[in-house]
Image (cartoon, rainbow, N blue to C red):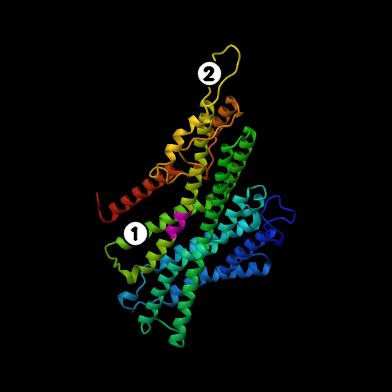
Amino acid sequence: MEDEREIIYSRSPQVSGYSDKEGVVELRSFRLCLKWVCLDQSNIWRSGLSWSIFFLFSFGVPLLSNFALSCSSCDDDHTRPYHSVVQISLSIFATLSFVCLTRWARKFGLRRFLFLDKLGDASDKVQHGYAEQLQRLMKLLLVFILPCFGAVSAYKVWWYVSGARELPYYGNIYLSDTILCTLELCSWLYRTSVFFLVCFLFRLICYLQILRLEDFAQTFQKETEVESILLEHLGIRRNLRIISHRFRAFILSCLVLVTASQLISLLMTIRSSAKVNIFKAGELAICSISLVTGLFICLRSAIKITHRAHSITSLAAKWHVCATINSFDNTDGETPRAQITSAQVFRMGAVWESDDEEGDGDDDLDNTKLVPIFAHTISFQKRQALVTYLENNKAGITVFGFMLDRTWLHSIFVIQLALLLWLLNKTVGIS
C-alpha cells in the first residue's frame, strides 16, 4: 500500500469545517488499530511481517497445539474432543478476514476504502459523526474481544495448571507450559481480532451511509429542487452498491461458515457418546459466541442501513402528500379553492409530538410528523415523478442481488431453523 494512499484527506483547502489535522489524527488512530493486530502492510517489510504473523498464529500455533499437546492418558477433564473444531473454525475465519483486508487495502487504499475521499462534500454533521465513530473503533473492538479473551485465558490457565503433571512438556515443565499457553492465547486473540475488525469496519462504513441518509432527509424540510434530491439519492445508491460489492463475498461466506460450524458443533455435542461439560466444551462455547456475534454485527448493520434507505421512500411520499394538500390552483376557469394554511396542517403533528409512548423511536427518516411546506414548492408532476422513482429504485445492502432487509433475515432464520430440526431429527429422533 503506498503512503500517499494512506492520507485521509488531500492537501487542498477544505470546503467544509473539517481540517486536515483532524483527518491525520483519525488516520493515526486507525493505523494503531492495524498495527495492534499486525495488519499494517504499508511497505514490503511490514507486509512480510504481517503475512508471517498470520501464518504463525493462524496455522503454526494451532497445529503445534494439536499435536504437541495430544494426551491420550489424561483424565476426562483434560481431554479436548472439540479442540480441532475450535481451531479449524477460528483459522478459517481469520484467513477469510485477513485475505479480504489485504485485498481491500491493496486495491483501494485506506482513504478510498473507508469512503474518506467522499467526505469533502458532506456536511459538518456527517464528517464529525463519522470521525467520532472512526476514533471509537478500537474501543469497540476491546469491548467485544476482552470479555471473551478473559474467559479463554481463565480456561487455558486452569487447563495448564490443573493438568501440569499429565500434559506433555518439553524441557522445564513450567517454562514449557508457560510458552505453550502464551502462544495459544496470542493465537486466539489474533484470529478473533482480525475477524472482529472486518465486522466493525463494515459497521463503520454502514454508519457513514446512515449519517448521509439522515442528512439527506433534511432536504425534505426545506425548499429544494427535484434535481438536487435526485442527485443526492443517486450518490447514496452508488455508495451502497459499492459497499455491497466489496463485502458481499465476506458476508455470504460468514453466513455459510458460521451456520456450518454451529451445526457441526451441535452434531458433536449431542451424539450419544459425547460427554459435555464446562471443562470439555468451554472453549467451543466461547468460540461459537464469538463467531455468532461477528455475524450478528454484520447482519444488523446491513439490515439497519437498508431499513433507513427504504424509509426515504416513505418520507418522500409523506412530503408529496403534505405539499399536495397544502397547494391550490390559480388557473383561470377553475373553481377557486380555499387555501389550507400550514398551521392547520401541522396541528395534528403537534398533538402527535406530545404522545411520548408512540414517538420514542422516531427520527428524521422514520417518524409520524408532517413535513413543513413552503409557499413556492415543487410542482405536482415533479414530486410525483420523484416518488415513483424512489418506489422503483430502493437502495440498500445487497448480496449477489438479494436485498438484506428484514424479510431476508426472516427467510434465513426459517432456513436455519429447518436445518436445526432436520439435524435433531436425524440424531435424537424428534418429530
**Residue occupying image coordinates x 44% and y 82%:** 177
Residue 195 placement (x, y as % from top left): 51, 61
Q: Amino acid at mark 2?
A: Arg
Q: Which residue is mark 1?
A: 266
The front one of 221 and 393 is 221
Residue 294: in magenta span: yes
Residue 142 to residue 166: above or below:
above
Region rendered in magenta: 291-297
Residue 228 pos. (x, y %): 64, 36
Find residue 33 and report its horizontal and vertical position in percent.
Answer: 58, 65
- Report which quarter residue 292 is drawn in: bottom left
Residue at x 44% of width, y 67% of height: 87
Of residues 57 and 338, the one nearer the viewer is 338
Left or right of residue 134, residue 165 in this image: left
Question: Which residue bears the numbered disc 2?
Answer: 337
Can the viewer see residue 100 in this picture?
Answer: no
User: CA–CA distance between discs 2 and 1?
Assistant: 70 Å
Residue found 46% across the figure and 87% down from its top: 171
Residue type of the residue flagged with mark 1: Leu
